[in-house]
């Protein structure tokens, strides 16, 4: 097995997109330009069977390995030709050993990476003294009827949605320009503690977004913009990527209504799953949970050079 860098985005995406979906599409990965590092997993010199991606950045003279902003995981995928559980498990262990060795050999001061939820074997990382941390997202199956999906909503959530409707909140699809969406979400993120990667965020709208891969829903009352939700999708899954409301409006239930409309839109598009794309903030988790979704774990691996780890234990004890 050989791990080596891939310089051709087309080569990587041809294999990765069928396995990973929209976050391994050429349009999405093009958001990051030359900063994104693509690694191929080869069975031999020429047979590409898997891969992953990450950013290698430098700050204060230190090297950091991390996820691309607004991307939920490192895109790891691989195919096995194993015929039984033993051979499949052995191959998976071999791949994860190689991936772990690859990251260890980068000798970064800090490594923080999340993996797709389908990847569950992290023993090689544990053995190599990484911190393997469970994280969670919420998902709704869109194979059910809309009536069944809504019947799983918390009653307070349904009441908030009905209240917004009674207050004559109107939801429109794809009415804002790319520049308007960018400005809205920059302003919205500025009101939170979230990191804002303005270049990448702008690229999400100007380089990636079109009718084949994303949509926005916007809420209005008396012509006033109350909130937006922006989702990306592929043939299987719709991801809630960004959401925000105008808190000064005083109108309740806007975000609840926007999420419901996003779920309805995703079902109309033929997606099988609606993914809230990460639910680790306590207040956000409670809101997403009110839609009755399934809790799904995924894992991050974290490792820091010892002096940095000691410092991080004071600020990010839950991770280090």
Image (cartoon, grey):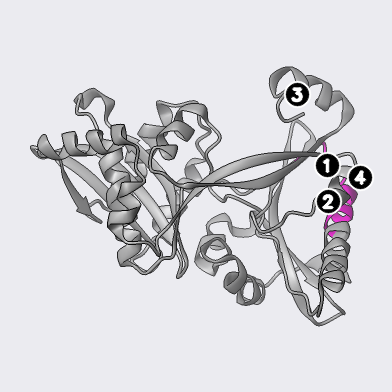
Do callouts 1 and 4 mark residues in contact (Cβ within 8 Å)?
no
Give the CA separation, mark 1 to mark 4. Answer: 18 Å
Q: Of helix, strand and loop, which one carries label 1?
A: loop
Q: Which residue is mark 4?
A: 127
Q: Of helix, strand and loop, which one carries label 3?
A: helix
Q: Percent position (x, y) of residue 26?
A: 54, 68
Q: Of helix, strand and loop, which one carries label 2?
A: helix
Nearer the camera: disc 3 or disc 4: 4
The disc, 3 or 4, on the residue closer to the chain's N-terminal end is 4
Do callouts 2 and 1 mark residues in contact (Cβ within 8 Å)?
yes
Nearer the camera: disc 2 or disc 1: 2
Image point (48%, 41%), residue name: 198
Mark identifier at residue 103: 2
Q: Quadrant of residue 317?
A: top right
Q: Which residue is mark 3?
A: 312
Query: Is 232 displayed left or right of 253 in the figure?
Result: right
Image point (24%, 23%), residue name: 248
Which of 197/302 is in front?
A: 302
Q: Of helix, strand and loop, which one carries label 4?
A: helix
Give the CA separation, mark 4 to mark 2. Answer: 14 Å
């Amino acid at each position: 097995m050989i791990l080596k860098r891939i310089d051709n985005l087309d080569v990587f995406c041809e294999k990765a997109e069928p396995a990973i979906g929209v976050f391994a599409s050429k349009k999405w990965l093009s958001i990051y330009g030359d900063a994104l590092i693509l690694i191929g997993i080869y069975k031999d010199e020429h047979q590409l069977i898997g891969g992953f991606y990450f950013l290698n950045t430098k700050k204060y003279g230190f090297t950091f390995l991390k996820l691309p902003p607004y991307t939920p995981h490192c895109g790891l995928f691989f195919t096995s030709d194993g015929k039984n559980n033993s051979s499949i498990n052995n191959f998976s262990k071999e791949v994860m050993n190689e991936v772990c060795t690859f990251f260890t050999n980068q000798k970064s001061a800090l490594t923080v990476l999340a993996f797709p939820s389908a990847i569950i074997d992290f023993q090689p990382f544990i053995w190599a003294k990484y911190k393997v941390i469970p994280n969670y997202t919420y998902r709704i199956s869109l194979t059910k009827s809309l009536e069944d999906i809504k019947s799983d909503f918390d009653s307070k959530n349904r009441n908030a949605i009905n209240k917004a409707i009674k207050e004559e909140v109107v939801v429109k699809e794809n009415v804002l320009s790319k520049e308007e969406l960018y400005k809205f979400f920059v302003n919205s993120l500025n009101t939170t503690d979230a990191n804002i990667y303005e270049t990448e965020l702008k690229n999400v709208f100007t380089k990636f977004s079109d009718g084949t891969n994303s949509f926005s829903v916007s809420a209005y009352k008396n012509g006033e913009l109350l909130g937006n939700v922006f989702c990306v999708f592929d043939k299987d899954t719709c991801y809630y990527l960004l959401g925000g409301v105008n808190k000064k409006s005083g109108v309740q239930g806007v975000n609840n209504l926007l999420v419901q409309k996003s779920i309805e839109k995703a079902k109309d598009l033929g997606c099988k799953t609606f993914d809230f794309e990460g639910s680790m903030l306590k207040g956000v988790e409670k809101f997403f949970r009110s839609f009755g979704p399934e809790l799904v774990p995924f894992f991050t691996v974290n490792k820091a050079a010892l002096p940095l780890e000691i410092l991080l234990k004071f600020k990010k004890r839950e991770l280090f």
